[in-house]
Amino acid sequence: MRRSTAVMPPKYAMTLMSVILAGFAVIGVANLIKVSHTPEGLTLASAVVSCCYVLQMAHCSPSARRRLQVVNRRFPWTLALQALLSLSPVFFLGHQSGALAGFLAGACTVLLRAKLAYALFGVINVAVLLTALGTGDDLFTAAFMVLSCASIGLITTALSRLVDLVTELHRRREESAWVAVSRERVRFTQDLHDLFSYSLSAITLKTELANRLIGKDDAQARQELSESLAITRAALADVRTVVHGRRSLRLLDEVELSKRVLDSAGIEMTTEGDFRHIEPRVGHVLAVVLREAVTNMLRHSRAARCRITLATRCDGQLRQLELTVANDGVSGPAADGPHAAAESQHGGSGLEHMAARAGQVGGSLRTESVDGWFVLIVRVPALRPPAAPPVTVATSPTTFEHLSSGPEHGR
């Protein structure tokens, strides 16, 4: 079984930083107590170090720092307060603390811009050195104070960056999870739409036809009910594949099913082209578009004839498959233009859905209305040369004036 990579939770990172900084704070209190054995000195040292620790945690915590940035719009006054508290032991006890100076140096690198932050980082360390020498410490002790200040400042900076990175990582992971869930929801919705909008339309159509045929042509009624049952079983099988994300349609199967459904509706359907040798991903998209087009034709038009054509169009090195679905169901206001026809036959969102499907493989969709024919044209890249390529034609504007006349449209 594969192990998942463990990621430090933000709360754990914050706890780790608070414990380490608390350890440095204790060291700071101990250093101040060494130079003052009075209860007042102990109280003062503990109060100063505690206040600096609280300010340091506020500066290093991502959530607290965001709130402070809203308050400190011009200058981080909390940093100024921390600087004052860090210098107070020099005035009241005649001694300094490397831990407090290190906290201050680390806070500068966290709150301020890079150039200013590291300039102040160096100034603080120089000030620690000069203060140590000025208060009577030897060179070795002064060097130790500078080393403590610089080390604690860098450790504080590193811990703060660690908390920031862990917090950002978890935020990104939550966003990625949300995006993944949203994509899966969209996929599931699209697949259910593709499946049930067509299947239910086909089942309704065949059931109504069978109901009309009962008592007139019982054999044909049984045939329609049998096909309706087959569509129902296929839909149930598709539901299982949709749930597991393995559903894939074949264009050839969709053409054959469309022919049976349109025959039941009394719509004469003709085909042209080779629908067999198509790359599976492209074939799935074309099958979905064909299913949507036929569904909307059954719902929103009074077509008597339908023509489905698949061809390959070449434009230099670019090869595209062009699927054309045309029907003579445009009448009345819908015949005034392509947009009116689109609204008539697709109810507004159908074209958007099909265009989105074509766009998944870098394709495009357009519609035309010519002499009472509504024409839907989908072009997608031919991702892989088929074993037996469809009919190849030169690239040119497609017209369908020939669709509305002549007996060649019969089956």
Image: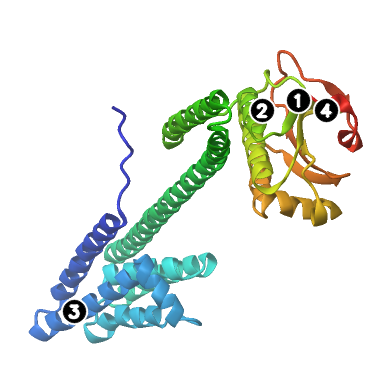
Label 4 or label 3, whichever comes before in sequence order: 3
Label 2 or label 1, whichever comes before in sequence order: 2
| Circle number at residue 271 | 1
Cα–Cα gap, marks 1 and 3: 91 Å
The label nearer to you, 4 versus 3, is 4
Q: Residues within 10 Å of mark 4 (few under 14, many from 20)?
A: some
Cα–Cα gap, marks 4 and 3: 98 Å
| Circle number at residue 259 | 2
Is residue 153 visible to the viewer in this orientation of the structure?
Answer: yes
Kindly identify the amino acid type of the residue bearing the numbered disc 2. Answer: Lys
Kindly identify the amino acid type of the residue bearing the numbered disc 1. Answer: Thr
Q: Secondary structure at mark 2?
A: helix
Q: Which residue is mark 3?
A: 45
Query: What's the residue at 81%, 57% (across, down)?
Result: 333
Cα–Cα gap, marks 4 and 1: 9 Å
Cα–Cα gap, marks 2 and 1: 9 Å
State the residue in front, 272 or 151: 272
Q: Quadrant of the C terminus?
A: top right
Q: Secondary structure at mark 3?
A: helix
Residues marked 2 and 1 touching at CB (< 8 Å): yes
Position of residue 111 measured from the top left corner of the image (x, y, whole percent): 44, 70
Kindly identify the amino acid type of the residue bearing the numbered disc 4. Answer: His
The label nearer to you, 2 versus 1, is 2
Query: What's the residue at 79%, 53% (across, down)?
Result: 334
| Circle number at residue 409 | 4
